[in-house]
Structure formats: C-alpha cells, structure tokens
Amino acid sequence: MTDKGLQRIRRFSGSREQMQELADALRAGNLVAIPTETVYGLAANALDAAACRRIFEVKGRPLIDPLIVHVSGPEQAESLAEVSPQARLLMERYWPGPLTIVMRKRPHVPDIVSAGLPTVALRCPKHPLTRELLNLSGLCLAAPSANRFGYVSPTKAEHVEAGLGDSIDYVLDGGPCDIGIESTIIGLADAEHPVLFRPGAVSREELSLALEREVLLPEPRHADESAPVDAPGMLSRHYSPQTPLELFPSGGMPPLSMPGHVVGERCALVLFARPDAHFAALPQAVDLFWLSESGQSAEAARNVFSLLRRLDEGDYAHIWMEQAPAGGLGDAINDRLGRASAKR
Ligand code: TXA
Ligand code: MG
C-alpha cells in the first residue's frame, strides 16, 4: 500500500466552502475522488480531454477502456448523447441510481472518454454530495472507479487514500457506499437490441420488463484481450486482490486445496452468510469470515470489496470464497468474484 508519508490527498466532508473548492478544482482540470451509491469514482471534467487523460495516468488504465460520464439528469445526458425513447424511459425509471446507459455520443465528447468508440456511457448517480457537486460545478464528470487499474474497487474514502493518496489532491468523503458494486451497464446504441454489458443492482430481468424486450448478454470475449470489442474494459481479470483467491459454489464446501497451497499456511475462508452452530470445525490455520449477517445479497454486495481489501492486507496465503446464490444482485456479485479470482 501507499507510504502514508507521501500522501498529498485531502479528505473533505462536504462543507459549503469545500464543495466550492472542489467545483473550482474540477473546472481548473484537476481530479477529485467522489462518493457514489455504487463505488467511489475518480472524477474529471468530461469535456476536458487533458483532465480525462490524467485519470488514465493516475489509475494506470489502458486507453482502450472507456470512461463512464456522470450527469445531473436526462437534460445533461441529451447534451452528450442521442437519447432514444427507450433510453429516456430507463432514465425516468432508474435515475438517479445504479444504471449506466451506453448511447451514441455527440461529436464534442472527447475521444479519450469513449476510447474512440462512437458511443458514450452515461449515468446519473444518487449520492447527495456528488449530485450537489454536479449541480454546483455545472460539469459532466467522467469517473471510473477510484482505484489503481485491476485492483479491488473502493467503497470507502480510506480505500481511495490507500490506493491513490499520493497522486490526487482530493477525496470527498460521503461515507461507505450503499450498494458496494458498480452500476449495471446497458448498451442502447441500437435501441432495438439492448445488451447487458455489466450486471449490477438493476437486473437484466427488470430491464427486459421495462423495455418490453429481452436484454441480451454480449457475445463471449475473444481470448485476445487487446482486441476491441463491444464491451471494452470487461476484462476477464479485474477487481483482483494480490492474494490468490479461489471460489466455491454457493452452499458447497471449499476444496481447501489450491495450486501451490501448503497445508498449514494461514488462509481465509469467506462464507456468503453467517454459518450456524453446526458449521464444521476448521483447521487452526483457517480464519472464518462471511459477507452477510442476514444472508441477503444486498448486504453481501456492500461488504464484498471492503472485505477483499481487508483480507489482502492480512497475511493470508490464500482466500477461499463462497459464491452468492444465483439471481439478481447475486449474479452481479458472482461476476465480480469471477473476475477477481481469474488467473493472471
Ligand atoms: O458504478 C459505476 O459505474 C462506477 C461509479 C464510479 O459510477 N464507475 C465505474 O467505472 O464502474 P469503470 O471505469 O470502472 O467502468 C467503466 C466501464 C468500462 O470498463 C466499460 O466496460 C464500460 O464502462 N463502458 C464505458 N463506456 C462504454 C462504451 N462506450 N461502450 C461500452 N462499454 C462502455
Ligand atoms: Mg473499475
């Protein structure tokens, strides 16, 4: 993690003067980490190509991976994209909230934001501090998750500080994120053929019902990760802790075997829900954790990235984690866990 001695980041809690300073900083082309209901974002003025380029540099993010632009509502969305009636319907139903909509972009949206694609991804976040900042600055804010590329997404201000504290000036602390995993992304560039680019808190079933047509899954990716595809950035390895992570099916038991694992090494075993009293005794070297007290996917989603970070800081040789029960938010959690555990 970052050496605290090198920290230059300042944590703001959102006083009137601070909000004004952040709006000014964004207008001047600086970066600000912002709270959203999903994860923390690393924001820049979306129409300032140089500021957006800094996002890629600071994150170590490849330029082929386009950014999501945060807007104050449908009106600002219209200024950046061609909004179809289907997109308008989803905005009215789900904004502000955890739904990103990919639409055809207008020409003045910088290529660096869209990675050269003819489309742009837009979302209207729900966190009150970020909504205030959007309104106060009058800007549209390009913001990917505020972490180094490929690492676990940040759901608290301290996660942003740990990863980016030596390279950015500000984090606006809005408390722990409510949802805890990134927004659902739907592709509506072709309104007749909606595609689910990334699962999230708004499910594919809900979206299909709202649009009165089936939202399809994208074609499977090629083995060649550098090839441009419809859903760039959906890399098979992502959200990954340093510690080797292995998954096991919901309701199953961990194999407690992993390539390279030496019996007796300290390991973390993470269940989906708090186990009952009859849970099997574990070897002494295995510490037990769970994602949810209540067994609810919403609670598990809120905790999953935070727990992965915490375990990564512990001196575990391996992490075993139970998948979420399938369906709804469980599918979105399993999508992230699948990428987090993908082999290098
Ligand atoms: O919840 C969220 O969406 C968070 C918060 C900060 O709002 N943001 C976020 O950004 O997850 P990021 O950079 O981690 O996700 C951006 C992803 C890209 O990797 C890509 O998969 C998709 O959004 N994306 C962006 N623009 C796209 C486009 N034009 N076409 C298809 N996919 C796009
Ligand atoms: Mg991300």
Image: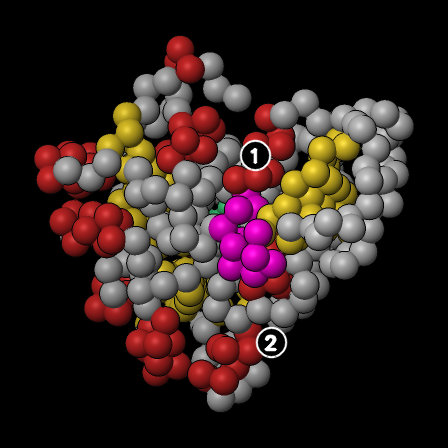
**Front in this rendered view, residue 39 or 280:** 280
Q: Which residues are magenta?
A: 293-305
Seen at 60% across and 48% down, the residue is 291
Mark 1 vs mark 2, CA separation in Å: 32 Å
| Residue 231 visible in the snapshot | no
| Left or right: 160, with 273 as reference point | left
As drawn, the label of residue 309 is 1
Q: Is residue 298 visible?
A: yes
Q: What percent of the width, then of the height, locates residue 74?
A: 26, 69
Q: Is residue 166 left or right of residue 75?
A: right
Q: Which residue is mark 2?
A: 216
Above or below — where is 317 with respect to 293? above
- Tell me: 73 left or right of 229: left
**What's under tag 2, amino acid-wise?**
Leu
Q: Nearer the viewer, residue 18 or 58?
A: 18
The circle drawn on residue 193 is: none
Is the C terminus in the top left, top right, bottom left or bottom right quadrant? top right
**Nearest to viewer (mark 1 / mark 2):** 1
